[in-house]
Image (tube, rainbow, N blue to C red):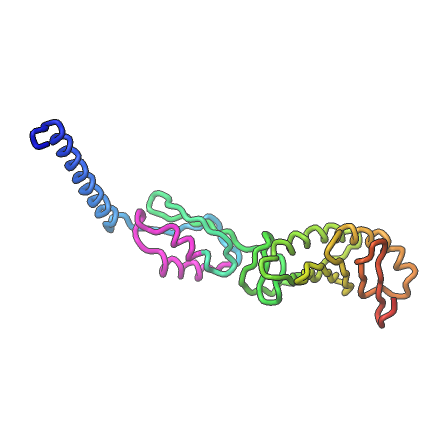
Amino acid sequence: MWDNTPLLRLISNLLFGISLGLVLYGAARYVLRLPVFPLRAVVLTAAPQRVSTEQMEKIVHEQVSGNFFTVDLDRTRQAFEQLPWVRKVSVRRKFPWNLEVTVEEQEALARWNGSALVNTHGEVFAARTEQSLPEFIGQTDSSMLVTRMYGELSVALHPMQQRIAQISLSPRYAWQVKLDNGMVLELGREQMQQRLTRFITVYPYSLAVMTRPANHVDLRYRNGFAAYLPGGNV
């Protein structure tokens, strides 16, 4: 081996290349960490509506560290996403020496089980609001299913000019809807939209024969429904 000149030259060149690479890597890391590359500004692409400037500034001062090249973009993004009313954040470097932050805020659709909120994507999040919102009641991990059903049933209810005040999904996956006029509709577990459409079709005629509007309607019948009047009359 030691008298194999081409092999020794190859090994020597390889070791030299590795050494040079390590030196250059170390030098690059040292140069990039020098204070000559400071972050000069964190720029928001749009002013948030629900997240205060003070909250954003606190994240910048407490969580954003390093210079333009060494700042941890993923860690910075996660820090911003911990703020209430923030759904998603994107962070990118922008020359010269700035960070550009884009914030997507939550859009509350309903209250969830009395303790949280649901956004328009069906995702549960924690925040406070004084908005008048419908109530969603369901099992853990069912928020997207309830949100989708809320949208479908809201469209079906349009001819009645009524809105959903509360929609519930029981542990047995039975649906119940309470309208903003106080009427409760029992939809059951199957053919919810068909049952609701059938009720909406005959509802104007039923009003003509009832002495007063029903407060509870059971739609879980094959060919009809039962309307319960205030006081327990059917």
Q: Main SS of the magenta segment? A: helix
Q: How many marks?
A: 0
**Residue 54 rendering spot, x and y as whole percentages:** 44, 62
Quarter of the picture containing the N terminus is: top left
**Residue 96 rendering spot, x and y as whole percentages:** 33, 44
- 215 is higher (above) or lower (below) than 44: below
Question: In the depicted view, which residue is nearer to us: 193 or 52?
Answer: 193
Taking the spot 80% from the left edge, 65% from the top edge, the residue there is 216
Taking the spot 68% from the left edge, 59% from the top edge, the residue there is 173
| Residue 116 in which image quadrant | bottom right
Q: Is residue 163 magenta?
A: no
- 186 is higher (above) or lower (below) than 231: above
Q: Which residue sits furthest front? A: 1
**Residue 144 rendering spot, x and y as whole percentages:** 61, 54
Question: In the depicted view, which residue is nearer to us: 159 or 130?
Answer: 159
| Residue 161 in which image quadrant | bottom right
Question: In the depicted view, which residue is nearer to us: 216 or 208?
Answer: 216
Question: In the depicted view, which residue is nearer to us: 29 or 224?
Answer: 224
Q: Which residue sits furthest left? A: 3
Q: Is residue 152 left or right of residue 225?
A: left
Q: Which residues are magenta?
A: 51-80
